[in-house]
Image (tube, helix red, strand yellow):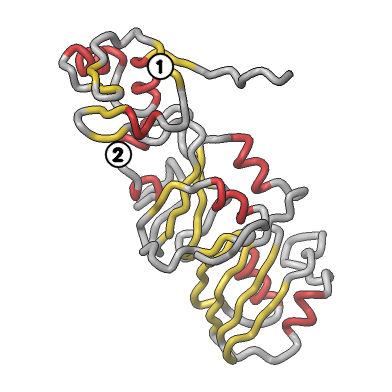
Amino acid sequence: MTGKAKVVSVRLDRLLANLGYGSRREIQMLARAGKVVLDGAPLHDADRRIALDPDLPARLTVTGKPLDPLPGVALMLHKPLGVTCSHKEAGPLVYGLLPPRWRQREPALSTIGRLDKETSGLLLLTDDGALLHRVISPKASVSKRYQVTLDRPLRGDEGAIFASGTLMLDGEEKPLLPVTLEVHEPTRAAVTLTEGRYHQVRRMFAAIGNHVTALHRDRIGALDLPADLEPGQYRVMGEGDLARVFGSGSSDP
């Protein structure tokens, strides 16, 4: 006979502090003021333990607004040009596209892999370390598709070179795994790869004498960047989205 799964619970002040709502003292003040409401009833005791049920964000409000997503969240974000996937570098950062409170979460949100400053497109973020490592693990072989604009027309032999598994990048001693090339126009193509070497797509085309002028990632696994997700926008991923990252389910946005 299978028992029920154990429900994890946590103190209200710790939960809200870890979600970036303020210090524990500030959470206690919110609770005493009746600003934290569960199932329609104010929670005046910030020491109370709260069950971390999946539906909690729909049942608990803070200052009249639904609770932020619980720890274990994953996001898809349409990264615009000019922002950097870093917590520390100077200039605009992808984390600046999120609500200010989300930048105070513990555990912190991190990008799953990176897109360089001049590359746009689909970027995933999570506070779940196991999920992050599962996606980026070479064993998972999660594919990524990039739309590429080139400085010069393709010659015609690039697809065979990329698919051969013998292309060497400058400064490296191990050839690239096979990469799929789909030509759209003489200077526009899509490449699908499973590795994530530093500036890989740009260096691949440089190795064959061409130059990438624009780069946009539109798919991870079988998950497409939604057509209605504008640059700078994000949304919380559901179980179906995560399944598509690992290659199952429909790839429709």
Q: Residue at x 70, y 58 (%)?
A: 195
Residue 132, x across and y down, in percent: 60, 42
Secondary structure category for the residue under label 1: strand
Q: Is residue 109 above or below residue 41?
A: below
Secondary structure category for the residue under label 2: helix
Residue 100, label in figure = 2
Residue 32, x across and y down, in percent: 19, 12
CB-based contact (under 8 Å), mark 2 and mark 1: no
Q: Earlier in the sequence, mark 2 or mark 1?
A: 1
Q: Residue at x 73, y 83 (%)?
A: 158
Residue that sits furthest to the left in the current view: 33
Q: Which one is nearer the viewer's eye here, 49 or 122?
A: 49
Camera-side mark, 2 or 1? 1
Residue 50, label in figure = 1
Q: Is residue 79 above or below residue 210?
A: above
Q: Which one is nearer the viewer's eye here, 215 or 24?
A: 24
